[in-house]
């Protein structure tokens, strides 16, 4: 073979070599993407909100995603108190800020406790003597696990296989009355008929704040589970059966949230409260 021929082949060898290297890199990149998608299941997010028949929207919410996972926070400012909007906004903002400071999720209980305490202090400081307060529910989804914290009467629910799984409890006087009935301090009628049974006994924004209810252990989510965060404007307006029917429709998380808000507005309730819903759907 002549020198001329060898020199003529050299550029082709280089091109073929580079093509092979690029091909291998593309395969490796595709494999890495596939591995990452299997390691970190996606979370589909939907939300909806209506002011109802109130003068002001006192519900506030946020959803943030970072390397730790997805956090959603919903706060329902207490209606009738002038500082309701301030309280709900401050609470959600504080919970998100504290989450973004986290280096890892090893002390998730500590996170919820600290965020609630800081929120309560900041709300009282921001109100400057004005009456105000807020309920709050917060969830974190990380690697298929659900962590949560709650205070007040907003609810966290999991919709799985056409049915609801209740997650947190309402911090209202009704629960206290039930305990007093069980201990035979009051009668069943007194517990059921109390006009104050829906009054909050724990919320963010006042000196006597007790604590935030925190999950004892994370909940393992299943494929296509839907985690709902609801202000009481949702759960006091629509029954569980109505919610189950809407969530069973072939709708994505966003459209399902919009359908729920539309169903609330169609009822045209005279004193409809603010209503907010967040839906987080676990993917593969």
Image (cartoon, grey):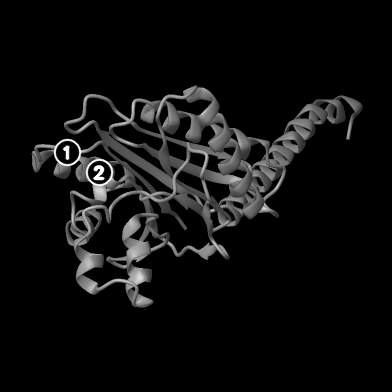
Distance, label 2 to label 1, CA atoms, is 7 Å
Residue beneath the point at 25% across and 55% down: 247
Measured as percent of width and height from the top left, residue 22 is found at 69, 37
Task: For residue 256, say whether it is visible.
Answer: no
Task: Tell me the element at label 1.
Answer: loop
Residue extending furthest toward the front: 185
Residue designated by label 1: 272
- How busy is the neighbourhood of tag 2: few (under 14 within 10 Å), some, or many (20 plus)? many
Query: Badge 2 is on which residue?
Result: 233
Q: Give how far across and how far down residue 153 sits, in percent.
A: 36, 50
The circle on residue 182 is none
Count of labels in the image: 2
Badge 1 crowding class, 10 Å Cα cut-off, few under 14, some 14 to 19, many 20 or more, is some
- Observer-nearest residue: 216 or 165? 216
As drawn, which residue projects farthest toward the right?
A: 3
Image coordinates for residue 151, horizontal then vertical, percent: 45, 49
Looking at marks 2 and 1 on the same chain, the residue that comes earlier in the sequence is marked by 2
Disc 2 to disc 1: CB gap under 8 Å: yes
- Position of the N terminus by quadrant: top right
Q: What residue lies at 60% left-to-right and 37% top-to-bottom?
A: 118
Q: Which quadrant of the figure has residue 5?
A: top right
Residue located at (19% from left, 70% from top) = 189
- Can residue 102 be seen here? The reply is yes
Locate residue 165, reporting x and y percent.
36, 66
**Which of 22/205 is in front?**
205
Kindly state the secondary structure of the residue where label 2 is placed: helix
């Amino acid at each position: 073979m002549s020198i001329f021929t060898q020199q003529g082949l050299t550029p082709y060898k280089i091109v073929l070599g580079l093509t092979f290297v690029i091909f291998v890199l593309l395969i490796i990149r595709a494999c890495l993407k596939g591995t990452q998608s299997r390691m970190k299941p996606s979370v589909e997010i939907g939300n909806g909100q209506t002011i109802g028949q109130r003068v002001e929207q006192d519900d506030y919410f946020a959803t943030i995603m970072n390397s730790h996972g997805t956090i959603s926070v919903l706060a329902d400012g207490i209606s009738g108190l002038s500082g309701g909007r301030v309280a709900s906004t401050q609470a959600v903002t504080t919970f998100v800020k504290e989450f973004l400071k986290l280096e890892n999720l090893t002390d998730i209980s500590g996170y919820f406790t600290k965020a609630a305490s800081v929120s309560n202090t900041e709300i009282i400081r921001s109100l400057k003597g004005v009456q105000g307060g807020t309920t709050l529910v917060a969830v974190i989804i990380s690697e298929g696990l659900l962590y949560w914290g709650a205070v007040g009467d907003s609810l966290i629910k999991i919709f799985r296989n056409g049915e609801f799984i209740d997650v947190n409890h309402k911090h209202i006087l009704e629960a206290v009355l039930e305990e007093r009935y069980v201990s035979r301090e009051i009668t069943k009628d007194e517990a059921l008929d109390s006009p104050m049974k829906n009054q909050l006994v724990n919320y963010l924004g006042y000196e006597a704040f007790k604590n935030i209810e925190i999950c004892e252990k994370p909940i393992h989510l299943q494929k296509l589970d839907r985690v709902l965060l609801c202000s009481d404007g949702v759960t006091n307006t629509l029954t569980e059966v109505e919610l189950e029917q809407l969530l069973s429709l072939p709708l994505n998380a966003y459209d399902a949230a919009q359908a729920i808000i539309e169903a609330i507005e169609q009822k045209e309730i005279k004193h409809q409260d603010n209503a907010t819903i967040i839906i987080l759907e676990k993917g593969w």
